Amino acid sequence: PITAVRNVPDKPICITIQTIAYLCRHFWASFRKVGPNPTQRNSLGAMVEPKKFPSESFSDVLEANKRHVGQFSDSGLTGFARQGLAIVTCMDSRIDPLAVVGMTPGDVKILRNAGARVTQDVLRTLVLATYLLGVERVLVLPHTDCRMAKGDESDIHRLIAERSGVDTSSIRFETVQDQRAQLAVDVDAIRTFPLLPQSLVVAGAIYDVHSGEMMPVDC
């Protein structure tokens, strides 16, 4: 059996052969499991060769970041939501969540997906945000003129197939038929999620992408 060896004053530390063998087995098992670099395994666990960053395709982004670094002044921020707010909204590029609510970096946790849907991943993230990052209230904020509210699942699958030839029927896009009704369902999903604190305040609103107005909805 392997026993711990203490460092006794005036005596050298002794490492037994059994200890060395144990460490070697442990290291080799870990190496076989994750490889020399975990980032070199794909989602199926197979080793893949890392690809060089496509700098040419992202040249505008990299140049913009250089300018950003030159005027960066938020190094003192923490991951804590200073205003205690989390916003669940859509990935639509017309929405600037911070501007919509008049806040700045560091104030809000922002969760985005197609359609501003309250998915299991959103709930998982809110659990972390509420218990560890200062969130005390959540605003679910879908928007007008949303593609996810302009057709059902079959419409989206068909459109993608027509444009790209890719069959996406194996996944759900969580399309919306009635935005106000679905907003009430999503707000309730947060309110009733058993792992979230009962003190969490949850509300819903719809953002008008043509006027900039945020319209509160009774949920």
Image: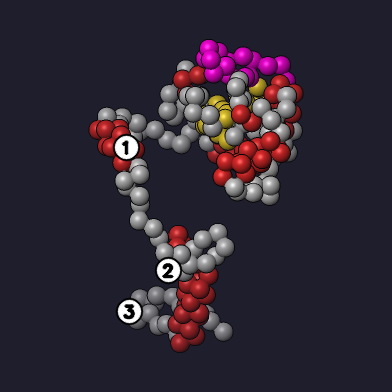
Dot 1: few (<14), some (14–19), or many (≥20) neighbours within 10 Å?
few
Q: Which mark is residue 60?
A: 1
Q: Nearer the viewer, residue 150 or 24?
A: 150
Identify the secondary structure beneath mark 2. loop
Query: Compared with residue 36, is residue 114 higher up or lower down, i.e. above or below?
Result: above
**Residue 215 lies in the magenta stretch:** yes
Dot 3: few (<14), some (14–19), or many (≥20) neighbours within 10 Å?
few
Q: Quadrant of the N terminus?
A: bottom right
Q: Quadrant of the C terminus?
A: top right
Q: CA distance from mark 2 to mark 3?
A: 38 Å
Please, which residue is most extreme toward the bottom here? 17
Q: Return the residue at label 3.
A: 10
Q: CA distance from mark 1 to mark 2?
A: 33 Å
Magenta-tinted stretch = 205-219
Specify which label sits upstream in the sequence, 1 or 2: 2
Q: x%, y% of residue 26?
A: 51, 75
Tag nearer the camera, 3 or 1: 1
Q: Return the residue at label 2.
A: 36
Q: Amino acid at mark 1?
A: Asp
Query: Compared with residue 134, is residue 54 higher up or lower down, i.e. above or below?
Result: below
Q: Residue at x 35, y 31 (%)?
A: 74
Q: Residue at x 53, y 12 (%)?
A: 211
Q: x%, y% of residue 213?
A: 55, 13
Q: Is residue 21 visible?
A: yes
Q: Amino acid at mark 3?
A: Asp
